[in-house]
Image: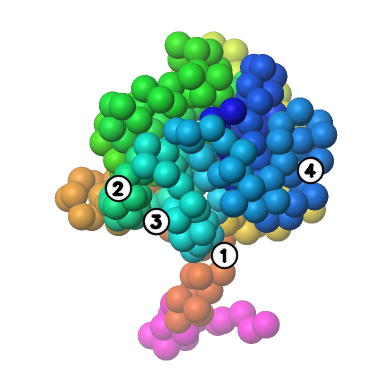
């Protein structure tokens, strides 16, 4: 047993389950140990209470896949894990991390003779059944070592995974992937909102979504998901119009500025998410007061 996963949330836990279905026994660890124990009981994996137990359970050279939130949680995990590893071991960072952090992390690992891979993972809660799309950066030698696990996690051994290039390229590719995702979601949202508010036609959004799934140019998994929830509820009255952003869209916009490549659609999709979070409220109040100032227009007061 050479492979361990740290972080058993929605993605990490299901990745461990998918590996179990492929007949691979691994070590698993989670901050809440009861989660690891429950998963081990379900899958036959080995639950480890801490990093020392995890490292001791794995044969050398080890592969430890961190499936933790990006930023501080991943850094904290590396701080605890690296002193315990041996030369020849390999760390995989599977978080939605910022690609600029990968080179420094790889350098930290290299100081101890440990290799490093950055892996962008897409597939969400559906990855357990459908497989994950994995894009990863690192050396050719490191890529060869993780290949069997990528093949087990992907939809098929020959599709859904790619060694994208050097360290950082995996997270960079996933960042751009998520920027495109923002834009596609925004386009669907705007189009269906436009149809919902068209007077006289009384358009059935659920039937239109289902129609477009079959043969249309815009058919996609996002449309499949859209058709599914619209079939249950077309009003969405119980849903607050608040859309979070998890960071990748911001990084994509910043990268477009740094590289001088125009990405207006992806950037505007990000701005719309800020708007939904109330970030535009004060600016809109300013606009209302300006109109009142120069034209005497009425303002609404809450």
Q: CA distance from mark 4 to mark 1?
A: 38 Å
Quadrant of the image occupied by residue 163 = top left
CA–CA distance between discs 4 and 3? 37 Å
Mark before the other along the chain sequence, 2 or 3: 2
**Residues marked 2 and 3 touching at CB (< 8 Å):** no
How many other residues sit within 10 Å of disc 2, few (<14), some (14-19) or many (≥20)? some
In the image, which is nearer the foreground, mark 2 or mark 3?
A: 2
Task: Give the residue at mark 4.
Answer: 37
Q: Quadrant of the C terminus?
A: bottom right
Marks 2 and 1 in Cβ contact (< 8 Å):
no
Reply above or below: 270 against 202.
below
Find numbered disc 4 in the image and state the secondary structure of the residue it sits on: helix
Q: Marks 4 and 2, Cα distance to the nearest angstrom?
A: 32 Å
Tell me the CA gap for discs 3 and 1: 15 Å
Q: Quadrant of residue 147?
A: top left
C-alpha gap between disc 2 and disc 1? 41 Å
Percent position (x, y) of residue 197? Answer: 63, 44
Residue at 45 percent across and 76 percent down: it is 283
Left or right placement of residue 212 versus residue 61 in this view = right
Q: Secondary structure at mark 1?
A: loop
Q: Is residue 84 visible?
A: yes
Magenta part of the chain:
287-302
* Residue indicated by mark 2: 110
In this figure, which colouring scheme has been used for the structure?
rainbow
Residue 81's place in the image compared with 296, above or below, is above
Q: Reading the chain from its start, which is encountered first: label 4 or label 1?
A: 4
Q: Residues within 10 Å of mark 4 (few under 14, many from 20)?
A: many
- Disc 4 versus disc 3: nearer the observer: 4
Residue drawn at point x = 66 percent, y = 17 percent: 23
């Amino acid at each position: 047993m050479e492979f361990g996963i740290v972080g058993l949330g929605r993605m990490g836990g299901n990745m461990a389950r998918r590996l179990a279905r492929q007949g691979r026994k691994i070590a698993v660890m989670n901050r809440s140990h009861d989660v690891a124990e429950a998963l081990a009981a379900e899958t036959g994996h080995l639950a480890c209470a801490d990093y020392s137990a995890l490292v001791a359970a794995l044969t050398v050279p080890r592969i430890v896949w961190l499936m933790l939130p990006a930023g501080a949680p991943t850094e904290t995990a590396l701080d605890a894990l690296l002193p315990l590893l041996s030369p020849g071991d390999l760390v995989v960072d599977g978080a939605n991390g910022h690609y600029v952090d990968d080179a420094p992390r790889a350098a930290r690992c290299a100081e101890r003779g440990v290799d490093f891979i950055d892996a962008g993972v897409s597939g969400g809660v559906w990855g357990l059944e459908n497989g994950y799309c994995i894009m990863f950066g690192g050396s050719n030698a490191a890529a060869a070592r993780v290949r069997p696990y990528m093949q087990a996690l992907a939809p098929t051994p020959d599709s859904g995974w790619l060694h994208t290039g050097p360290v950082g390229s995996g997270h960079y590719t996933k960042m751009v992937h998520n920027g495109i995702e923002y834009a596609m979601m925004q386009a669907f949202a705007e189009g269906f909102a436009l149809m919902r508010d068209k007077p006289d036609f009384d358009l059935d959004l659920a039937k239109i979504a289902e129609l477009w799934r079959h043969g249309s140019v815009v058919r996609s998994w996002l449309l499949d998901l859209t058709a599914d929830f619209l079939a249950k509820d077309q009003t969405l009255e119980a849903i607050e119009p608040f859309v979070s952003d998890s960071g990748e869209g911001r990084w994509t916009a910043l990268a477009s500025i740094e590289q001088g490549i125009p990405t207006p659609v992806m950037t505007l999709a990000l701005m719309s998410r800020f708007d939904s979070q109330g970030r535009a409220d004060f600016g809109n109040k300013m606009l209302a007061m300006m109109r009142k100032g120069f034209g005497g227009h009425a303002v609404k007061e809450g």
